[in-house]
């Protein structure tokens, strides 16, 4: 005979479901709290790394340069295939704009997205590029990152430095596809993705050079007005 105080099967199931729900809620709150605590430091670390790579694209010779960070307009962000809000940079040599530096993305990497930053001068020359994010196969496709490229004398990505963008009006391709860009055998997909991102960034930065310089000057003017007593 079943005791009156003994839980029924449905009561046991309900109790178990309630305990699981409470456990899931507690776990979610814990993970959410951890995310909130680590989000700011992670974002700061990512920004610091991007600024380090930006500075690597700025000529070290005197006179000193000024780097102004800007928030990219929505249309430019979309053209670069980025998620808003996206940041760009304008480099001034004394009072004259020298470089525009923007990120750009390709979704065609072997391991996922490949994100780069490119530096373009006012003459429409691509002065340099760096990979800021990729998930390519270590030791095979990660040569697109100069810090992982085994060729320290002439890393793969340096072949883009000095390219006159208007001189290459057709889509940029690796040599295997009939283009002018070198690629390592067995890791062409990585080179294709990086080339796509670099070309995208170079063309957008070149066409929007004046717009981004004007934006940098306007944001600087707003900052100075805001700092006035």
Image (spheres, rainbow, N blue to C red):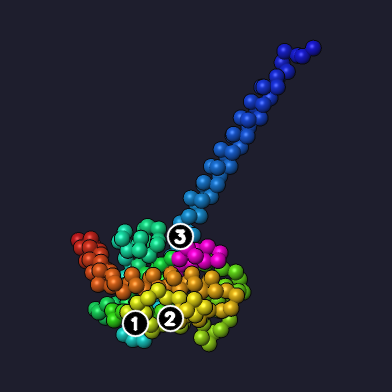
Q: How far is mark 1 from mark 2, CA to CA?
A: 13 Å
Q: Is residue 150 magenta?
A: no
Please state the horizontal and vertical placement of residue 85, each as a whole percent of the image: 36, 58
| Residue 66 appearing in the image | no
* Marks 2 and 3, the one that precedes in the sequence: 3
Do we see residue 136 in this rendering? Answer: yes
Q: Are marks 1 and 3 in contact (CB under 8 Å)?
A: no
- What residue is rendered at 40% in x and 62% in y? 81
The 10 Å Cα crowd at callout 3, few under 14, some 14 to 19, many 20 or more, is few
Pointer 2 residue: 160
Q: Please tell me how crowded label 1 is: few (under 14), some (14-19), or many (20+) other residues with Cα within 10 Å.
A: few
- What residue did someone put label 1 on? 167
Single out the mark in the foreground, 1 or 2.
Answer: 1
Q: Find disc 3 in the rendering and name its residue.
A: 43
Give the mark, 1 or 3, whose residue is nearer the N terminus. Answer: 3
Side of 209 relative to 53 (left or right): left
- Give, as a single range, the part of the protein colored magenta: 106-116
Identified at 24% across, 78% down, the residue is: 95
């Amino acid at each position: 005979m079943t005791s009156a105080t003994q839980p029924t099967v449905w009561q046991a199931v309900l109790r178990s479901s309630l305990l699981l729900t409470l456990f899931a809620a507690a776990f979610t709150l814990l993970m959410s709290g951890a995310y909130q605590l680590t989000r700011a430091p992670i974002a700061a670390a990512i920004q610091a790394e991007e600024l380090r790579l930006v500075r690597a694209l700025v000529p070290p010779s005197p006179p000193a340069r000024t780097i102004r960070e800007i928030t990219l307009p929505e249309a430019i962000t979309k053209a670069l295939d980025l998620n808003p809000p996206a940041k760009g940079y304008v480099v001034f040599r004394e009072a004259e704009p020298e470089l525009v530096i923007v990120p750009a993305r390709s979704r065609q990497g072997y391991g996922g997205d490949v994100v780069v930053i490119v530096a373009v001068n006012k003459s429409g020359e691509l002065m340099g590029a760096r990979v800021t994010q990729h998930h390519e196969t270590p030791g095979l496709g990660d040569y697109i990152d100069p810090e992982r490229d085994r060729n320290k004398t002439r890393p793969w990505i340096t072949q883009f430095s000095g390219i006159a963008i208007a001189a290459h009006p057709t889509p940029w391709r690796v040599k295997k596809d009939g283009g002018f860009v070198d690629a390592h055998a067995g890791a062409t997909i990585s080179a294709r993705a990086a080339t796509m991102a670099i070309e995208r960034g170079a063309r957008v930065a070149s066409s929007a050079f004046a717009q981004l310089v004007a934006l940098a000057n306007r944001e600087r003017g707003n900052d100075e007005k805001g700092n006035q007593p």
